[in-house]
């Protein structure tokens, strides 16, 4: 937990690094990072840096302070093949100056997948964009959910997002629920920049303020 002060590096609920020669395994499960004050460079419920590692049921809770970027869970290894499952971010207050990811696979050569990641925003502010699940590799994103109940997002909001043009993975069953707060950018239940499908996704808007 971070309650005050200044941390120029990231805060981790779980961090997986395997330094054995040729080792590619190592998982993170049921870890939580909690930020209630201070300044933090980044917050990870879990960061898995092993190529074949998985992240399961990890959480980032932000109730105050200032954070650059927030991840419920991330697979950050080159060529990552693992899975992110049931990761979550909860933000009720504080200031995120960058982006927020319920689940994130960060490497363009990764083939891993994201399943049932969730982002709940009830207050606070986000200077960048927010993603229920974002896969920057070639794999899939399934069942990502973004619940925007309050707070302010300057950038775009996505339930599920696949970034690169040569990705072949599908986005399936993403949900975006907007009942309050404000969004300065675009709003997507699912966005697939590759050749795969974006299907069975739902956007529900019952309140809040969207840009013109």
Image (cartoon, rainbow, N blue to C red):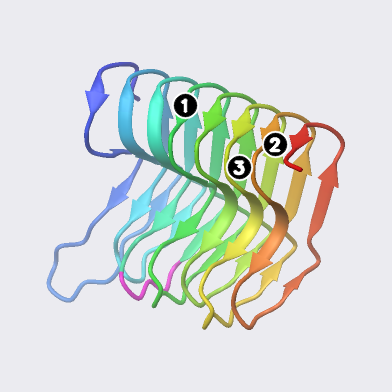
Q: Nearer the viewer, residue 112 or 190?
A: 190
- Residue for badge 2: 148
**Number of numbered tags placed on the structure image:** 3
Between marks 3 and 1, how big is the CA–CA gap? 15 Å
Q: Residue furthest front?
A: 212
Find residue 148 and report its horizontal and vertical position in percent.
70, 36
User: Could you classify mark 2 by the number of other residues whose Cα lies within 10 Å: few (under 14), some (14-19), or many (20 or more)?
Assistant: many
Res 28 seen here:
yes
- Residue for badge 1: 95
Q: Are marks 3 and 1 in contact (CB under 8 Å)?
A: no
Q: Is residue 109 left or right of residue 146?
A: left
Between marks 2 and 3, how big is the CA–CA gap? 8 Å
Between marks 1 and 2, how big is the CA–CA gap? 15 Å
Instruction: Write down the region rendered in magenta.
Output: 78-82
Prevailing secondary structure of the magenta residues: loop
Find residue 111 and report its horizontal and vertical position in percent.
46, 77
* Sequence-first tag of 3 and 1: 1
* Sequence-first tag of 2 and 3: 3
Quarter of the image with the C terminus in it: top right
Task: Check disc 3 and report its element: helix, strand or loop.
Answer: strand
Please identify, in this view, whether the residue under mark 2 or under mark 3 is nearer the observer.
2
């Amino acid at each position: 937990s971070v309650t005050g002060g200044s941390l120029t590096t990231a805060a981790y609920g779980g961090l997986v690094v395997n330094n054995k020669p040729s080792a590619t395994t190592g998982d993170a499960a049921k870890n939580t990072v909690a930020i209630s004050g201070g300044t933090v460079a980044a917050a990870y419920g879990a960061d898995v840096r092993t190529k074949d590692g998985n992240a399961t049921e990890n959480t980032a809770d932000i109730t105050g302070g200032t954070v650059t970027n927030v991840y419920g869970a991330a697979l950050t290894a080159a060529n990552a093949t693992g899975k992110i499952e049931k990761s979550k971010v909860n933000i009720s207050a504080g200031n995120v100056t960058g982006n927020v990811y319920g689940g994130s696979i960060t490497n363009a050569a990764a083939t891993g997948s994201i399943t049932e990641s969730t982002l709940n925003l009830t207050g606070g502010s986000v200077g960048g964009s927010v993603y229920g699940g974002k896969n920057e590799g070639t794999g899939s994103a399934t069942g990502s959910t973004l619940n925007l109940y309050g707070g302010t997002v300057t950038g775009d909001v996505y339930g599920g997002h696949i970034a690169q043009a040569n990705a072949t993975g599908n986005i399936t069953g993403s949900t975006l629920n907007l009942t309050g707060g404000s969004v300065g950018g675009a709003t997507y239940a699912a966005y697939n920049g590759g050749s795969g499908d974006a299907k069975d996704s739902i956007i529900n808007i019952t309140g809040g303020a969207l840009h013109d």
